[in-house]
Image (cartoon, rainbow, N blue to C red):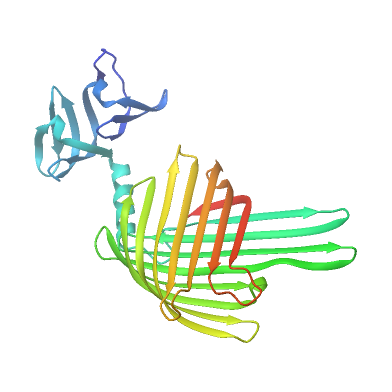
């Protein structure tokens, strides 16, 4: 390979796109070279070459003076303009890329899972003894046609003072959501949310729901969805009260990664009770995480549940704020 400044480099070309070329060398490892600094390239090994018109060629590459020649064993020499080359990869990288594309098109159920587990613990000892444990988990599997999202959150706190033990918090929230793509932007969904809160005297809230969603923004760093639909809210209280109500729901979900280290996410869902006019629920979840390592982050999470018609003597609002470490995994 020859650069425009006259330097010549030898090695194995592994990748080139519209911005840079990667050259694997024995003397300096992988070198990243700006594409506009390259004058000419000639390879002894076959490369996979992608052109703007959609053609994919495999052969030895010769690039220079605004032209590209690909010498293929099956079709001979094919010429094109240098500007028409969008990407080329080494044979090994192309095979790995093709394998990953096939995996995305026809994944096994155990493939493509990502997720995070949050853990936090606080303890106080002295005149009063306090133990607080919070944990949460989220797993996500996304393919080109659908996605599965499951979550779990729990908070438990107990205080002991002068030999008297008092439970300060005990709540569990969880759910499962399935999205099926209709178009690249629009999808339909079905979900189920479950909730227990001892201090709201709520034994179980069971909410199956369904509707339509729209990917307002969807790229490498940002995902912002808008959605709406209907749900059935079934509530079972420790007092023996049981309530069933139909709801119309609308909401949004946002996730944004910035500076390659920090992640902000929020989900807000409004449930309007159509069975008991004037009543409603509002679920708000906000999280911020700072990556320490690829598999480890520090996180702060706020999860709020507002209920306009709680049991007599109970507050309308339940806010849980947790902090601790986050363990991240990918499959």
Specify the quadrant of the image occupied by residue 199.
bottom right
Relative to the observer, which residue lies in front, 194 or 16? 194
**Total marks drawn?**
0
**Whole-percent x and y of residue 163?**
89, 66
Q: Is residue 316 left or right of residue 331?
A: right
Which residue is nearer to you in this view: 79 or 283?
Answer: 283
Image coordinates of residue 103 in percent, x first then y, are 34, 58
The residue sitting at 27% across, 62% down in the picture is 186
Q: Position of residue 271 (x, y in %)?
A: 44, 70
Can you give x and y, in whole percent of width and height, for residue 276 in the image? Answer: 45, 80
Give the residue displayed 44% in from the left and 44% down from the top: 257
| Residue at left offset 63%, top offset 60% | 135
* Residue 331 visible at all: no
Residue sitting at the far right: 162
- Asked if residue 321 can be seen in this view, the reply is yes
Q: Is residue 44 positioned above or below 53 on the image?
A: above
Residue extending farthest front: 278
Residue 28 vs residue 223, the one in the foreground: 223
**Which residue ends up furthest to the top in the rendered image?**
6
Q: Is residue 194 above or below residue 90?
A: below
Horizontally, is 229 left or right of 50 in the view?
A: right
Query: Which of the image's four quarters has the N terminus?
Result: top left
Q: Quadrant of residue 319?
A: bottom right
């Amino acid at each position: 390979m020859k650069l425009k400044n006259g330097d010549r480099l030898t090695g194995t070309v592994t990748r080139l796109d519209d911005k840079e070329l990667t050259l694997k060398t024995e003397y300096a490892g992988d070198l990243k070279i700006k594409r506009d600094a390259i004058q000419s390239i000639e390879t002894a090994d076959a490369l996979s070459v992608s052109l703007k018109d959609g053609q994919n060629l495999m052969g030895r590459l010769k690039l220079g003076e605004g032209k590209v020649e690909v010498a293929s064993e099956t079709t001979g020499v094919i010429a094109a303009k240098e500007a028409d080359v969008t990407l080329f990869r080494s044979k090994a990288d192309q095979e790995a890329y093709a394998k990953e594309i096939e995996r995305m098109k026809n994944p096994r159920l155990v493939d493509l899972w990502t997720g995070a587990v949050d853990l936090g613990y606080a303890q106080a000892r002295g005149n009063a003894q306090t133990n607080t444990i919070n944990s949460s988990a989220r797993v996500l599997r996304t393919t080109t046609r659908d996605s599965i999202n499951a979550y779990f959150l729990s908070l438990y706190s107990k205080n002991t003072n002068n030999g008297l033990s008092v439970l300060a918090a005990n709540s569990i929230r969880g759910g499962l959501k399935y999205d099926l793509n209709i178009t690249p932007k629009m999808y339909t969904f079905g979900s189920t949310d479950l909730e227990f809160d001892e201090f709201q005297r709520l034994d179980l809230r069971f909410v199956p729901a369904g509707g339509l969603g729209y990917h307002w923004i969807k790229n490498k760093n940002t995902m912002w969805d808008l959605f709406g639909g209907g749900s059935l809210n079934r509530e079972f209280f420790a007092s023996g009260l049981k309530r069933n109500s139909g709801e119309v729901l609308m909401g949004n979900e946002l996730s944004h990664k910035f500076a390659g280290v920090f992640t902000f996410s929020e989900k807000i869902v409004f449930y309007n009770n159509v069975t008991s006019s004037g009543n409603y629920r509002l679920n708000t979840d906000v999280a911020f995480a700072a990556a320490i390592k690829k598999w480890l982050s520090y996180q702060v999470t706020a999860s709020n549940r507002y209920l306009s018609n709680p049991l007599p003597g109970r507050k309308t609002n339940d806010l849980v704020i947790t902090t601790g470490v986050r363990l991240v995994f990918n499959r």
